[in-house]
Image (cartoon, helix red, strand yellow):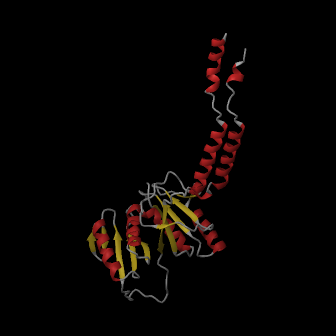
Amino acid sequence: MRRASEENPGVNMTALIDIVFQLIIFFIVTVKMEETTLDASIKMAMAPHGKIVEHKDPRTVYVNVDAKGEISINRQILPADLFKSIIAKAVAEYGAETPIVIVGDVKAQHKYIRKVMDACTECGIWKLKFMALREGG
Amino acid sequence: MARKKKKRRGPDMLELNMTAMCDVIFQLLIYLILTAKPMIVLANLDVNRPAPDATVTEATKITGLVDIMVFSDAYVINTKRVDADGLGKVLKQMSDYDKTQTVVIKCTWDSRHEELIKVLDMCTEYGLSNISVMSM
């Protein structure tokens, strides 16, 4: 009499688990840190003709402005004076060419965006970027 | 006895070795992941802020300037009230004439950010790259 295990040998899982772990390591290594800085609660406006973000400057500061007008960097909500001091520090460190990208919510009123722009201007930054979605939404 | 042996052989013949198949599937998966190009969904719209210049006085009139005002419900381009389609048409005409002219976008405090992005997108579409954003 044969035993059941001899008649139906199971799938060899060793190679499969090896490859699954390889994939997990691959995803962990290649995941972009920048994407974590984008706040999922902010719904960006559509700009189908906007320039594609090809070269990402590591100095770039992403400033999020939500619909309520709260300013945040890396999901950390900042009061206006602290935000200004952060920008001033960035300018002192990297110069007036520090790329500032404003990620504004669709419904955010301009008075909140203005606060960010004014703070940047006071710190000596004259060139700003607005982030939008080319497609999707 | 012979009949019994034949019945036992049946399930043994249907057995498949899955290991090689799994290996090939994962190879294909890795190939597709490595060769897939991520879809670029983000765009950047560059603007300038008006820099203070001590040599410029209020009396100085700057020519070749496109003045767009963004209100919460409408746009005004060079003192003419237009909707989004009308603004696009005017911007196209102006870009056909001269793409280097300065576009000054003035936003009211209660206008939504979406409206500003819409204007910036139109300017980018028609090749107007010298854009300044101001607040009213």
Extreme residue toward the top, this view: B1
Q: Position of residue B2 (x, y in %)?
A: 66, 12
Q: Looking at this view, is B112 or B21 the one in front?
A: B21
Quarter of the C terminus of chain B within the rendering? bottom left
Q: Residue at x 37, y 73 (%)?
A: B126
Q: Give the residue at x 37% y 69%.
A: B122
Q: Is residue A14 left or right of residue A124?
A: right
**Quadrant of residue A78 within the rendered picture:** bottom right
Q: Determine the image quadrant of residue B125.
A: bottom left
Q: Nearer the viewer, residue B19 or A124?
A: B19
Image position, residue A61 (x, y; %): 58, 65
Rendered residue at 52%/76% (across/down): A126
Q: Residue furthest front?
A: B2
Q: How many marks?
A: 0
- Above or below residue B63? Residue A66 is above
Question: Left or right of A121: which side holds B1?
Answer: right
Query: Can residue B136 be seen in this snapshot?
Result: no
Closest to the observer, A131 or A120: A131
The location of residue B115, given as percent across then percent down, is: 37, 63
The spot of residue A50 in percent (x, y) is: 45, 67
Looking at the image, is A39 positioned above or below residue A102?
above
Q: Quadrant of the N terminus of chain B?
A: top right
- Residue A33: in sight, yes or no? yes
At x 72%, y 23%, the residue is A6
